[in-house]
Image: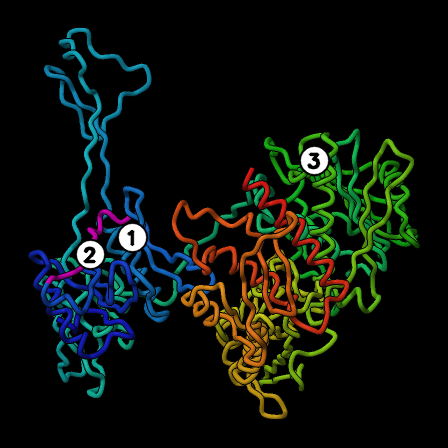
């Protein structure tokens, strides 16, 4: 039984031996058990999850022998299986959603089993999913029709046919379930021949090359369409090569490494493909791509301008004072996928940046540029649903000169580039001033944060300045210019741990990689620590290419799992095109994918003092834990005396440490000459409460320990007023504040 069952990583040998046998007594006919995994769930109590080819079982190990599975879900009833976030301090839970809309929790699955179990449940439920068939139902006396027949447009029945009965249903729908094939038993025998090893099953014969005698082959099972390596680890084909599979009389051809060709056909892209470029861009990442081009062009100033006409946003500009694009190269620059020779310090790479960024945000892209000694030249791409080809519009020279000569407030504009977006899809389609202002304020905030983060090294080095303004066409000129300030994610004033940052290095062949490891000071309020989305999501590796930040943390890329306790850890890694095979960058330049060699290098990386990557992560976690420990050490408070029930006093003492060297505070009632709610009697160490506000006992005898909720709250609020030799100005102000509020509340309650 257990040889064909996938056993979870935390299932004990005793459980693996006993539970499948116990479950077998509850399986139907030829139903096959596929997997057994451990879990943790309190309600209902579950210790294991088992999966067969027809059902998903929840098992409580303690009651399995006598009562059977606690829960059984039919595979055809399962619509989805996924992980539900447990929230702060709670584990993530694997759950399934049934086709009736309800959800069933399967518990906290070990990390090593989660993906395997999820895939197994999805496979089984997909194979058992019901299918619906709709077919035409001919009335009595009408000719029969094929099962897939549908009346063509304009079809009418023959008048000679009898009329259908009243309320006749012309369409019927059937629901069926695809049967799940039972696993085919396969017996593998190692025949010591030079030709082949043969594995045989009912109607199945698998021939594989002879293998060395020290490679064991054991009996296993597999189902059609199910990965034998994921569901049946005891039967693996990873070390052998499939030559042929004979089923009955037919034979399938062998796999070949090279795919032959017999010619080629040119397939130009559909012109509408322009609309699909850059769909992973946001407004801020798209603008950042345009700023890349400005910096590559040697610009010292870059301006981003929103243009508003009659209250409505109409256009967005990105203007720079770089060296411009000569007339001889403007067409190449506007070609989709056009490549040019990039310098060693250039940020561009794919030849798609300008077009992809622009088409992701706007329906019209106009580029006007002026190189040294040349007139302004312009081109425009216009996205049109009726586009027939890749035709780029030529902008007249007089308009190009006028646009270039507008009041941009950029120094040295004898050369440079003006990029204009019209029909920006993200702009609010309204002239409501309040909505437009909110959009502008919010968007400028996003741009400042993103550009300040992405280009922080360039801004800090003074290589370029980036600013943003808004132009109202009806006004005399643009509004005030808002600078983009550097947002250095490593810019702390003091390291969170002595000795950091440290540089860890690793080499593999000709490839050397450096990891500069930082630990932030806990609970920092600096914006460069908080960053958009918060420090917990910004932990991890920060990839830079030529001083441009490509990815700002967000994970450890296989080196470690994201963990709340590692939110102080950030690592800077410099990448470039010469590190082949380690990295790939998406065209939006917002994400980096790493190869398996990157993880190996990180694990091998070491500092001069012997610190490894694991040591660094451990140190960052320790700093975080220590900061939490200090914050969780509660201040000692004066003990409670008379007026508090003993059980309440014990409950408070369990949560708050009492100062043993201080006298206790009594909380008691007495009659006041006025309407004040309370009185702090430091000499008698008593908090007096006004008898007139004492809760009514409805004829019962009053207890000195009454009103526990009120007294507990007052103790927490005024306990510090019993400290020190006298009441200072702040204490007196607090007493007056508490008195006013509590007296007003008590009067209101009695009204």
Horizontal and vertical percent for residue 407?
Answer: 91, 43
Quadrant showing the C terminus: top right
Is 647 contained in the magenta span? no
Q: In the image, 111: left or right of 669? A: left
Q: Which residue is mark 2?
A: 71
Question: Crowding at label 1, few (<14), some or many (≥20) Cα neighbours within 10 Å?
Answer: some
Q: Residue furthest bottom?
A: 609
Residue 465 sits in which quadrant? bottom right
Q: Which residue is mark 1?
A: 104
Of the two numbered discs 2 and 1 on the same chain, state the one appearing first in sequence. Answer: 2
- Nearer the observer, 115 or 192: 115
Asked if the residue at tag 1 contacts the one at tag 2, i.e. Cβ–Cβ closer than 8 Å, the answer is yes
Is 73 contained in the magenta span? yes
Residue 313 sits in which quadrant? top right
Horizontal and vertical percent for residue 324?
Answer: 83, 53
Of the two numbered discs 3 and 1 on the same chain, state the one appearing first in sequence. Answer: 1
Q: Which mark is residue 403?
A: none
Q: Residue furthest top?
A: 159
Stretch in magenta: 67-79
Q: In the image, 375: left or right of 192? A: right
**Would residue 580 be seen by someone viewing this image from the given angle?**
no
- Nearer the observer, 590 or 486: 486
Horizontal and vertical percent for residue 285?
Answer: 66, 53
Position of residue 200 relative to residue 296, above or below, is: below
- Nearer the observer, 592 or 440: 440
- Marks 2 and 3, how far apart in space? 53 Å
Question: Crowding at label 2, few (<14), some or many (≥20) Cα neighbours within 10 Å?
Answer: some
Quadrant showing the N terminus: bottom left
Of the two numbered discs 2 and 3 on the same chain, state the one appearing first in sequence. Answer: 2
Q: Which residue is mark 3?
A: 435
């Amino acid at each position: 039984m257990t040889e064909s069952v996938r056993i979870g990583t935390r299932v004990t040998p005793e459980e693996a031996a006993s539970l499948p046998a116990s479950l077998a007594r509850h399986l139907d006919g030829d139903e096959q058990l596929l997997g057994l995994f451990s879990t943790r769930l309190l309600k209902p109590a579950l210790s294991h999850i088992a999966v067969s080819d027809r059902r998903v079982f929840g098992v409580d190990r303690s009651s399995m022998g006598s009562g059977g599975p606690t829960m059984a879900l039919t595979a055809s009833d399962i619509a989805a299986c996924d992980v539900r976030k447990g929230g702060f301090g709670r584990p993530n839970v694997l759950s399934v959603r049934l086709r009736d809309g309800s959800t069933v929790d399967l518990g906290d699955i070990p990390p090593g089993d989660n993906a395997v179990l999820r895939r197994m449940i999805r496979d089984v439920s997909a194979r058992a999913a019901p299918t619906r068939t709709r077919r035409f139902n001919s009335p009595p006396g009408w000719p029969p029709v094929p099962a897939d027949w549908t009346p063509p447009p304009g079809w009418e029945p023959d008048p000679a046919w009898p009329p259908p009965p009243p309320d006749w249903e012309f369409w019927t729908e059937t629901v069926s379930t695809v049967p799940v094939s039972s696993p085919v038993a396969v017996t593998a025998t190692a025949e010591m021949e030079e030709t082949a090893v043969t594995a045989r099953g009912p109607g199945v014969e698998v021939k594989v090359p002879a293998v060395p005698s020290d490679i064991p082959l054991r009996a296993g099972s597999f189902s059609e369409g199910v990965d034998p390596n994921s569901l049946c680890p005891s039967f693996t084909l990873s070390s052998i090569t499939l030559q042929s599979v004979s089923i009955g009389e037919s034979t399938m051809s062998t796999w070949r490494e090279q795919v032959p060709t017999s010619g080629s056909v040119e397939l130009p892209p559909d012109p509408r493909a322009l609309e699909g470029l850059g769909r992973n861009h946001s407004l801020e990442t798209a603008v950042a791509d345009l700023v890349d081009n400005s910096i590559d062009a040697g610009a010292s100033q870059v301006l981003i301008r929103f243009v508003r006409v009659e209250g409505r946003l109409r256009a967005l500009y990105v203007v720079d004072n770089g060296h411009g694009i000569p007339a001889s190269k403007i067409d190449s620059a506007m070609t989709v996928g056009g490549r040019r020779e990039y310098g060693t310090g250039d940020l561009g790479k794919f030849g798609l940046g300008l077009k992809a960024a622009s088409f992701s945000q706007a329906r019209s892209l106009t580029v006007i540029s002026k190189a040294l000694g040349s007139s302004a030249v312009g081109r425009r791409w216009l996205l049109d649903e009726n586009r027939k080809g890749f035709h780029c519009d030529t902008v007249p020279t007089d308009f190009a000169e006028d646009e270039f000569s507008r009041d941009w407030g950029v120094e040295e504009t004898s050369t440079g580039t003006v990029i204009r977006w019209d029909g920006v899809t993200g702009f609010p389609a309204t002239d409501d001033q309040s909505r437009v202002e909110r959009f502008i304020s919010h968007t400028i905030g996003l741009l400042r944060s993103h550009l300040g983060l992405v280009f922080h090294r360039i801004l800090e080095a003074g290589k370029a300045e980036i600013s943003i303004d808004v132009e109202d066409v009806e006004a005399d000129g643009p509004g005030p210019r808002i600078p983009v300030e550097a947002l250095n994610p490593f810019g702390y004033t003091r390291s969170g741990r002595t000795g950091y940052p440290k540089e860890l290095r690793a080499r593999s062949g000709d490839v050397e990689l450096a990891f500069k490891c930082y630990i932030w000071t806990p609970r920092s309020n600096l914006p460069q620590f908080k960053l958009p989305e918060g420090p917990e999501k910004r932990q991890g590796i920060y990839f830079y290419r030529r001083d441009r930040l490509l990815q700002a943390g967000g994970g450890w890329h296989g080196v470690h799992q994201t963990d709340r306790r590692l939110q102080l850890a950030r690592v800077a890694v410099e990448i470039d095109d010469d590190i082949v095979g380690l990295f790939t960058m998406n065209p939006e330049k917002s994400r980096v994918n790493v190869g398996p060699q990157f993880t190996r290098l990180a694990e091998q990386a070491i500092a001069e003092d012997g610190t490894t990557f694991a040591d660094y992560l451990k140190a960052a976690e320790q700093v975080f834990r220590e900061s939490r420990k200090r914050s969780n050490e509660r201040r000692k408070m004066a003990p409670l005396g008379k007026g508090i029930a003993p059980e309440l006093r014990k409950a408070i003492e369990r949560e708050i440490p009492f100062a043993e060297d201080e006298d206790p505070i009594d909380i008691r009632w007495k009659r006041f000459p006025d309407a004040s709610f309370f009185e702090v009697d430091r000499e008698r160490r008593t908090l007096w409460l006004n008898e007139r506000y004492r809760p009514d006992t409805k004829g019962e005898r009053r207890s000195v320990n009454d009103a526990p909720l009120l007294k507990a709250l007052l103790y927490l609020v005024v306990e510090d007023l019993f400290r020190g030799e006298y009441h200072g100005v702040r204490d007196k102000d607090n007493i007056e504040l508490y008195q006013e509020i509590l007296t007003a509340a008590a009067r209101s309650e009695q009204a």
